[in-house]
Image (cartoon, rainbow, N blue to C red):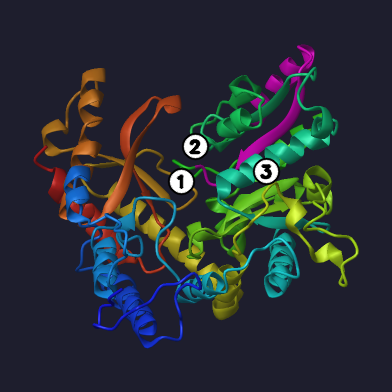
Amino acid sequence: MSTGDGTDRKVTFRGIDFESLDVRQFLDNVQTLIVDDVLVRSTRRENKVINFRDPVELQELLDLTISPDGAKHDTLVEACKNVIEYSAKTGHPRFFNQLYSGLNAYGLAGSWLADSLNTNGYTFEASPVFVIMELSLLQKICGILGYENGDGVFCPGGSFSNIMAMHLARYKVAPEVKTAGMYGMKKMRFYTSDEAHYSLVKGAMFLGMGLDSVVRVTTDERGKMKPEVLEARIQEDLKMGHLPAMVMATAGTTVLGAYDLLEALADVCDRYGVWLHCDACWGGGALLSNKHRHLMAAVHRTHSLAWNFHKMSGAPLQSAAFLVNEKGLMEECNQFKAEYLFQPDKFYDTSYDIGDKTVQCGRKVDSLKLWLLWKAVGDAGMAAVVDNCFENAQYLAEKMKQTDGFRLVIPEFECANVCFWYIPESLRGQEETPEWWQKISKVGPAIKERMVREGSMMMGFTPLTCKGHVNFFRMILANAKSDRTDMDFVVSEIDRLGKDL
């Protein structure tokens, strides 16, 4: 087989030889490409956030064929260049599209190192350093939460963490479910706000309890779950003979960024013996900041919590921690003691074989990238990133209040979400009838198309049906590199792209 530099590269059952000069040159070329084109050029403001191509066109631009004999190294490098060229640059300071943005160099180094070691986080013998590192890191996080007897595990995303909470809560209220399943049991109920993440609904389907087991509780004008309504719904279900199993509070709702009142919800849960889980996947970063920690007052009273460090702390995807306040419960609920993997007569302390904490078997090592990031910047650096997100959001909101054509969905918001409508000149000063709002609903999608096709920035739009809101922009501030100049650009660019609509 020919390589890019004209030499022959023989592929045998032994695989690729990492000591060969041509393979090392290939890896060096890809590393240079990543550093220069992804980490440097793709994060410069003068460059595009995305070089968008429609699906059919993109399929024609990418050579995705796989030949029987393999490809030359120069062909592979060119393919990597195309991957970069047509991907969204999520590290760009004007990528506001999702609940994550930016990339920390130390976290990236952790990802590279963990991937190169290619180990599995289920037993101490296979992953000695990473098991110790994960346990240490999770204990630090438990300390932040006030979980004195806490434990945790890294999960493949926040949705999985929330489903794990449902799984544990179900076991806690009815341990027999582990052996007998759901057959003949009372109908369980899982409560959350009407603005909570959809993972609870997916979890109900996945765990075999059905969509009807999820009870949506109404929220106030700021998007917070109403504790009095929650209590009334629990009382109704008890009268009907149902079994209240879990309440999922949210710290930083996906759209409006609302923080549920944990103290009040904990009081309700304590009265009825219900598990209180907190989805802090997005808003958990507030716990790292002395300025914003108050948003999660009484977090120590929750039974479990999901926290995604790839969202507001700049850790690489995925860095999703699931914490529980009762050590040993995860093993009790999930362990199977597979004899080929978790032998009790190993030569070391087998309590460090942590694979039975979760329903997974093979598990990617996620601790190093977060640990290395945190080690590098310290607690102060982690707090500074969070504070910057909140400060950018506040600055942008105040600017929009003073700029014609912009209207905030919630004037006084809490997290680093800025939700707003843009009203073109042609629709200003008119009576706000249903027909007028229908026209407004088309503004966001139109501007979004223009900004993406130009590549100037990216942000999402969404309706909020539970509040009766038509499409508005949901802008997320999660990038440590974003600053006030980017906020000024957002206002001027939205106005430029939409003023003629």
Q: Which residue is drawn at 69% across and 70% down?
A: 127
Q: Which of marks 3 and 2 is in front?
A: 3
Q: Is residue 430 left or right of residue 314?
A: left
Q: Earlier in the sequence, mark 3 or mark 1?
A: 3
Identify the element where label 2 is drawn: loop
Q: Quadrant of the N terminus?
A: bottom left
Counting from the top left corner in percent of width and height, residue 272 is at 81, 29
Relative side of 74 to 125, left or right: left
Segment colored magenta: 225-253
Picture disc at residue 164: 3
| Residue tagged 2 | 222
Residue 413 vertical position relative to residue 174 in the rendered view, above or below: below
Amino acid type of the residue that numbered disc 2 sits on in the rendered structure: Arg
In the rendering, which numbered label is found on residue 413?
Answer: 1
Query: Do labels 1 and 2 touch, CB within 8 Å?
Result: yes
Can you name the residue that lies furthest to the top here? 240
Q: In this view, does 437 lie above or below 35?
A: above
| Quadrant of the rendering where the C terminus is positioned | top left
Mark 1 and mark 2: span between their CA atoms? 7 Å
